[in-house]
Amino acid sequence: MINKTYAWKRLAAHYRWHKKDEMKDLFLRDSERAQKYKVDLGNLYLDYSKNRINDKTMKYLINLTKEVKLKEKIDAMFSGQKINTTENRAVLHIALRNRTNTPIYVDGKDVMPEINAVFSKMKHFCDDVRYGKFKGATGKKLTTIVNIGIGGSDLGPFMATTALKEYWAKDMKCYFISNIDGSACEDVLSEIDPETTLFVIVSKTFTTIETLTNAGTCRKWLVDALGEPAVSKHFVAVSTNAAEVSKFGINTDNMFEFWNFVGGRYSMWSAVGLSIALMVGMENFERMLAGANAMDMHFKNTEFEYNIPVILALLGVWYNNFFGFKSYGVIPYDQDLRFLPKYLQQLDMESNGKSVAVNNKFVKYSTGAVLFGGAGTDVQHSFFQLLHQGTSIIPLDFIIPAISHNEIGFHHEILVANALAQGEALMCGKTVHEAAEELAKSGKTKAEISQLKRYKSFAGNRPSNTIVIKKLDPYSLGMLIAMYEHKVFVQGVIWNINSFDQMGVELGKQMALSILPELQGNASGIHDSSTASLIKLIKKMRK
Ligand code: G6Q
């Protein structure tokens, strides 16, 4: 277990010595600090100097990577070894962005030719829809894309299409239906025209209850409007299950395949990203793949000391396992990245929210942290109060594009000023004495100062990373997402857990299946008394 290693114990001792070090003092003592703790990849820049670290911290954290053989584990992932041990699968989202086509073998077979074949099929299809060659049943151009999927088959395409809104074809719009709540279907169907709508059903298994129920409702809506033969002109599928796809009435020529070596939450780079490609064009989709590939190469080939995903992962471990900070926030200062935290919640929490190690033993240290966030400056007016003055310390990632797609007046300068100010304020804080001085300058009486000075003080010493991208374009989006994927991977390696399964989502699904017939009819099941009386109450209310 990692917590028994020398590197871990060294870190624990180091933590005891340095836990009270003030970052603002560290800056005063070292004028080079900002230059020392940064990595510049041109399109993406990481400043990690506002963290509670010194040179030794980084050295000891890097020692941890040797202890867990991180280099070998990275090579194992990139070479197609079956590192998803509980499902006996390779983990090859990196193959989807392997722009040099170097062969990658799974069970002795190079996976690149099939990947390229699907991309080429996607390209033709996207061009045909975008240029009006693939038309709807009544001969109209398809200009509305509705993505039906959930979890990994929704969050990536949803986040990325929103992030790349500036690259959408001008005559097209898109919607996403994921939740089983009928309102999710209704909200979309009430706004769209069947004659110009293309439904993209995304489901690896094509058995997911939410997706299949939503797809069935949309299918009925379309058939009611345009008749049964219209289905093949208005529905396409992304799946691994050809039999179920064709049962649904979708021509398997219009099915886009992906593979078991691509996990759901790592799948937006595959045909699961079809809605992204339809909206922004395959060229832009490929630019996104190229950005991710640039991050893959950086991750695979760079010394850990200068390796962005590794540094971010180690800082996360430092806070989670030594300081005991059990959550972290991601705050993009970009309106179009507002769904990034939602996407990252699945990526991080479904990957690393585990308690059993790869050696089949329960872990004795904490693993995945709670991730939350939202777009700045909006969230400054909601949860930032707690970040500044609450009793929990929550490390943050600020994400800032230097250039906006909408440079209107001073909007962007104000936005960026706020992002930078938050990082500085969280770190520097304001002592009670400083608060008192400020109150005195503003003309408050002695009594007022003594009454207010503590409320107006800020503890400070609260850490953050700042990630600057030049502009939110497909390439930098690809880099950013791949950066977080690899960060999550590194933490999984350190915690010795399998980041690529998600067995924790199963129990609730199983129980829902047994409660469903009880809600629908007279079936009765065995439950705790709370659940039993809630079933009874809701049935009564629905009568
Ligand atoms: C992600 C998970 C999960 C999955 C959904 C949808 O890693 O595997 O979120 O993507 O449960 O599954 P289907 O694509 O099979 O419908």
Image (cartoon, helix red, strand yellow):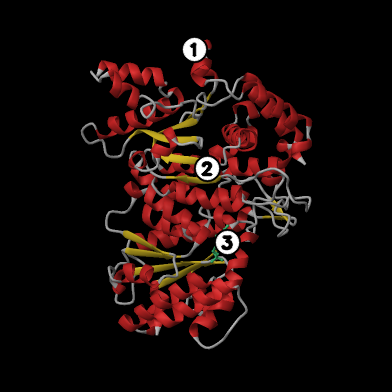
Quadrant, the N terminus: top right
**Crowding near the residue tagged with mark 1, few <14, some 14–19, many ≥20 C-alpha atoms within 10 Å:** few
**As drawn, 84 above or below 204:** above
Disc 3: which residue: 258
- Label at residue 28: 1
Where is residue 478 shown, x and y percent of the image? 48, 43
Q: In the rendered structure, which amino acid carries the disc numbered 3?
A: Phe
- Label at residue 292: 2
Where is residue 388 shown, x and y percent of the image? 42, 33
Can you tell which quarter of the image residue 315 is in? top right
Q: CA distance from mark 3 to mark 1?
A: 53 Å
Of discs 3 and 1, which sits in the foreground? 1
Quadrant, the C terminus: bottom left
333 or 377, which lies in front? 377
Q: CA distance from mark 2 to mark 3?
A: 18 Å
In the rendered view, does 167 fall on the left or right side of 259? Answer: left
Judged from the image, the secondary structure of the residue bearing numbered disc 3 is: loop
